[in-house]
Image (cartoon, grey):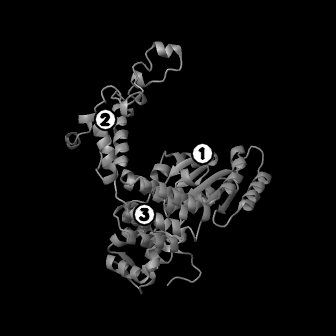
Amino acid sequence: MRTIMAQPLAERLRPRTLDDYIGQQHLVGEGAVLRRMIDSGRITSFILWGPPGVGKTTLAQIIANRMETPFYTLSAVTSGVKDVREVIEKAQKGRFFNEASPILFIDEIHRFSKSQQDSLLGAVERGVVTLIGATTENPSFEVIRPLLSRCQLYVLKSLEKDDLLQLLHRAVTTDVFLKERHIELRETGALLRFSGGDARKLLNILELVVESEQDEVIITDALVEKRLQQNPLAYDKDGEMHYDIISAYIKSIRGSDPDAALYWLARMIEGGEDPLFIARRLVISAAEDIGLANPNALLLANAAFDAVNKIGWPEGRIPLAEATVYLATSPKSNSAYLGVDAALALVRQTGNQPVPLPLRNAPTQLMKELGYHDGYKYPHDYPGHFTPQQYLPDGLQSERLWLAQHSPAEEKLYERMVNYWGDRYSEKKDKE
């Protein structure tokens, strides 16, 4: 059995060098961008973005081992502006002329407030410190733009099946405790399924199963499922299933089941989920899944986001619940979502088509002489504020990108388009 003072398995197996690091070959494989940077001994500020358990903190620690420069670590959960300023002051005092900048690693940087992030700006810009941030959330939303513009962004992916199997075999054959237990990996499907590409979760589950058995351990899918049913939090530790739960939440809204949507909302609230993360997903769902079938859904979701941003927990659960029920019970349409994707596909296929001359702006006399704006018909000068004219580039004028789905609200929009454009928006044309 494991010694009381032993570290958790995930910590014991944490790689110390890039050669031992599993996964993320697009970043650390031979010739990849981070490998070249680390091998050169000089790095620039960057942010690592990826789901839990894919090696963000491990990469930072490997860099700390390789770089001959001071290495400071802060957690955004426990550190404030004062802590940031103290580290920056130490870095300034301890740096010698022409020496590489000290490295400051901030775990969960998405939890830093705007003022905390602002306090980093000057030091990063002047090279007082080289910043390495780690986040599970989209930096575009969570990191202020001035700081984001001073850092490279590297995206880490969930570990693949082969990566996880390699990690499992390494654990049972090299770990100081597990290699004494005579472990047979007879089946690995449940281990891989419950881990969800998260190395730390995989090792936590493996450790739980091994510790629950005596002497020889034969791991099967049935054994893993049995042990996890007895210990449901073993694979949901510290809310690491939040990607699965937010997926269930959005799918329940899309499927018009307000009871299920409220249940998954409650799971996230109880698990300590960031309320703004939930609110952002509501805004996306309102635009993607409800769309033109009920345009008010986007207004309500955005209002809920603003309310939660102002009041936080616990009162924030009320506008979130209101928006959740409204979206789940609203009619659904994804015609705008499909339409913009169809337009993007057309642009990628046809390239940069020229804007028709009548639609071009003509601020100078030369442009007017070249025919810019010539022939443009101002719709407000015509009955009903509409007159037919070509708006798409030459050769694409018959393309249909928005296809109405004829929900009650969209039917009116569709009928207006048929009245304006005739055959271009006819039912027959849609079916073709």
Residue 247 visible in the displayed image: yes
Q: Marks 3/1: CA distance?
A: 55 Å
Q: Secondary structure at mark 1?
A: helix
Nearer the observer, 242 or 283 = 283
User: In percent of the image, x 28 and y 50: which residue is there?
Assistant: 406
User: In percent of the image, x 28 and y 37: which residue is there?
Assistant: 419
Of badges 3 and 1, the one in the foreground is: 3
User: Residue 165, position in %: x, y?
Assistant: 39, 65
Check residue 204 in the rendering and tell me which mark sits there, or answer none.
none
Q: Residues within 10 Å of mark 1 (few under 14, many from 20)?
A: few
Q: Amino acid at mark 1?
A: Ser
Can you say whether 78 is above or below 365 in the image?
Answer: below
Q: Is residue 134 left or right of residue 240?
A: right
Pick whichever of labels 3 and 2 is earlier in the sequence. 3
Q: Amino acid at mark 3?
A: Tyr
User: In percent of the image, x 29 and y 50: which residue is there?
Assistant: 405
Q: Secondary structure at mark 2?
A: helix
Kindly identify which residue carries mark 3.
326
Q: Residue furthest bottom?
A: 214
Q: Is residue 102 left or right of residue 196?
A: right
Pick whichever of labels 3 and 1 is earlier in the sequence. 1
User: Residue 1, position in %: x, y?
Assistant: 49, 85
Of badges 3 and 2, the one in the foreground is: 2
Kindly identify which residue carries mark 2.
420
Q: Marks 2/1: CA distance?
A: 63 Å
Can you say whether 30 is above or below 381 in the image?
Answer: below
Kindly identify which residue carries mark 1.
40
Q: Amino acid at mark 2?
A: Tyr
Q: Are marks 3 and 1 in contact (CB under 8 Å)?
A: no
Q: Secondary structure at mark 3?
A: helix
User: Residue 141, position in %: x, y?
Assistant: 55, 53
